[in-house]
Image (cartoon, rainbow, N blue to C red):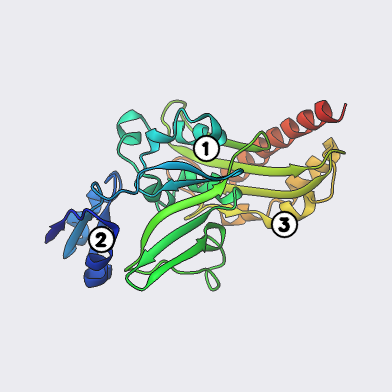
Amino acid sequence: MNIFIPKSVQETLEILNKYCSECIILGGGTLTVPMISELNPRAVILLDKIPLSYIKQIESKKIEIGSTTKISSIMGHDNLGALNIAAKSISGWAIRNMATVGGNILAGFPWGDLATLLTVLDAELLVESVNGERVLDLGKLYGDEEKRPKLQSNELIKSVSFLSPDSNTYFIKVERFKGTKRGILTIATRLIIDKEGYITAARIAFGSAFYHPLRDKIVEEFLKGKMLSADIIEKALEKISVSRLFLKDSLASEQYRSKLAKIYLRRILESYMIQISRRVT
């Protein structure tokens, strides 16, 4: 097994192109280190020296984060709003000081808390190979199996860019046992609401319940053009469609996750309703 510690993106891409699926990329290592002995790869690439750890504003309402940025680096940034909350919900300080943003996006069930929130913020991944760069819609990456774009084995995630989380963005992580940081369901929402209180756009995603975050486009479409009320919220909850895909594990059954989805989405939508009433009045 060959171990590489490249100092530039270009050097990394050349190694990736040579070994492709026979290598493991190690960012923070919280998930990949245990895989090394199991998969016995020909090469391991450590990303410690690559200059992809940063957080910056790229537009007035858009943020970009480098893929090797540690989860702990997100915490304390006031302009990151709900993303700050999501970062704090991930494990303890030891893990947050090692785990990277890029790794969390690809972590899969039941991890990947950041990915659930980034999905509703219309996030895009900038990936690169020796053949050049391309941009992937994160939502489509988690979309329909037949239509979703594929991340190639010789591609490196360089950064993720997304809309700045504002007061219309919510994130909730539900734990079976308080303090464990092991979620059995996460919910992220972003509603765009006009001055009259009508919803002009909606994004709703559920995580820690499937192999990747699930956007519920049926509920999103139902809410569009409506003003929240107790009746509308009740109807929206009945339209949750992705719960049929929820998985079961040692901590929760698919039915339990489905019940939690209704309970906590109700709480979020009621918070929006209070927010709207204050704004309109």
Residue 25, how many percent across, how many down? 27, 56
Residue highlighted by disc 1: 83
Q: Would residue 152 be found to the left or right of residue 257 on screen? A: left
Point 47% across, 42% down: residue: 56
Tag nearer the camera, 3 or 2: 2
Camera-nearest residue between 41 and 233: 41
Marks 1/2 in contact by CB < 8 Å: the verdict is: no
Residue highlighted by disc 2: 12
Residue 87 position (above or below residue 220): above
Residue 120 visible in the shown view: yes
Q: Quadrant of the C terminus?
A: top right
Residue 131, how many percent across, how many down? 36, 73
Point 61% across, 39% down: residue: 260
Residue highlighted by disc 3: 218
What is the distance, in whole Å, between disc 3 and disc 2 at their CAs? Answer: 41 Å
What is the distance, in whole Å, between disc 1 and disc 3 at their CAs? Answer: 25 Å
Residue 142 position (above or below residue 48): below
Q: Amino acid at mark 1?
A: Leu
